[in-house]
Image: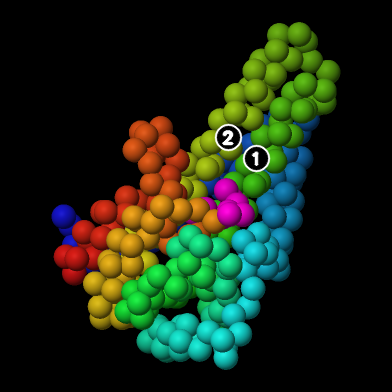
Amino acid sequence: MKRISFDEVAKNNVKTGILFFLFFGIVLGLGVLTGIILGNPNTGILIAVVIFLIYSAIAWFKGKTIALSLTGAKKAPQQQYQQLHNVVEEISISAGISKPDVYIIEDTSMNAFATGLKPEDSAVAITTGLLNKLDREELTGVIAHEVAHVKLRDTRTMLIAGVLVGSIILLSDIIFRFSLFGGRERDGRMQLILLIVGVVLILLAPLIGQLIKLAISRKREFAADAEAATLTRNPGGLASALQKLSTQHKKTLDNESQALQHMYIIGPDTKSWLKNLFRTHPPTEQRIERLKEM
């Protein structure tokens, strides 16, 4: 098994950048196609840019709040959760970033996530199930993993990925509707071609966007594991926590949103090759083996 290294982290950053260029290329391509249907490619590009800016504004100003509210996370009172606050502060100091806000999710499953566009306005949320079932060493490993996501700007990356996926889905829907009812006068053959293109796009574009988002998410988990091991100088703590999380009977939150699944420290495991195609995380056993080799 290949050992985690920071050369690998750097390579993952480059691959993520390439994926984002591909992402944005799809958005612009859909914009051009919208413009062709309307009779003016520039108009289509303008529509694509406006949609992207609207989604970006929502993510910038409300992304953190939306993510926390969708999971039912509440701020963790320091007096009641003193040890948790201590661990978050210790790891934040080690990472050289501001202490994220600390949230608790009342749920028996064991899971955690981080969110926020920048370290000084970030948050870490964990379930009560995780807090009750992990010892301090394991809890430190999980918190380090989430703080690593904040430090490495992964939380920003995933929010932007969500913006691009949303833009792709909306543009695909616009193209489909215009191919049916809108645009300039066309002959029957052209109308049929555009209708077929619209149907294909509305089926494939969101799928492609989702696959790219999942590819980004998988790469970030390995990088965050590596950074967490460095912050704690104890990869065994996170490995032990992941082992417990992987064997729990209840792996999803009661009110878990599909849109946020990629943000959690662990996702549902599956043996199905089709479901594996859409899994948001690399296999947990692979992550554990890599940590044990450090």
| Residue 62, above or below 171 | below
Label at residue 121: none
Mark 2: few, some, or many residues within 10 Å (few <14, many ≥20)?
many
Amino acid at circle 1: Ile
Are the two marked residues, 2 and 1, in contact with CB atoms closer than 8 angstroms? yes
Lower position in the chain sequence, tag 2 or tag 1: 1
* Magenta segment boundaries in residue numbering: 254-262
Query: Is residue 203 in sight in this rendering?
Result: yes
Is 185 left, or right, of 52 in this rendering? right
Instruction: Please name the residue that numbered disc 1 is placed on.
Output: 169
Q: Name the residue tied to disc 2.
A: 205
- Given residues 203 and 289, the one toward you in this image is 289
Q: Residue at 16% x, 55% y: name it.
A: 1
The spot of residue 100 in percent (x, y) is 54, 80
Q: Magenta span has 261?
A: yes
Quadrant occupied by the C terminus:
bottom left
**Coordinates of residue 148 in the picture (x, y in percent):** 41, 73
Q: Is residue 59 above or below residue 30?
A: below
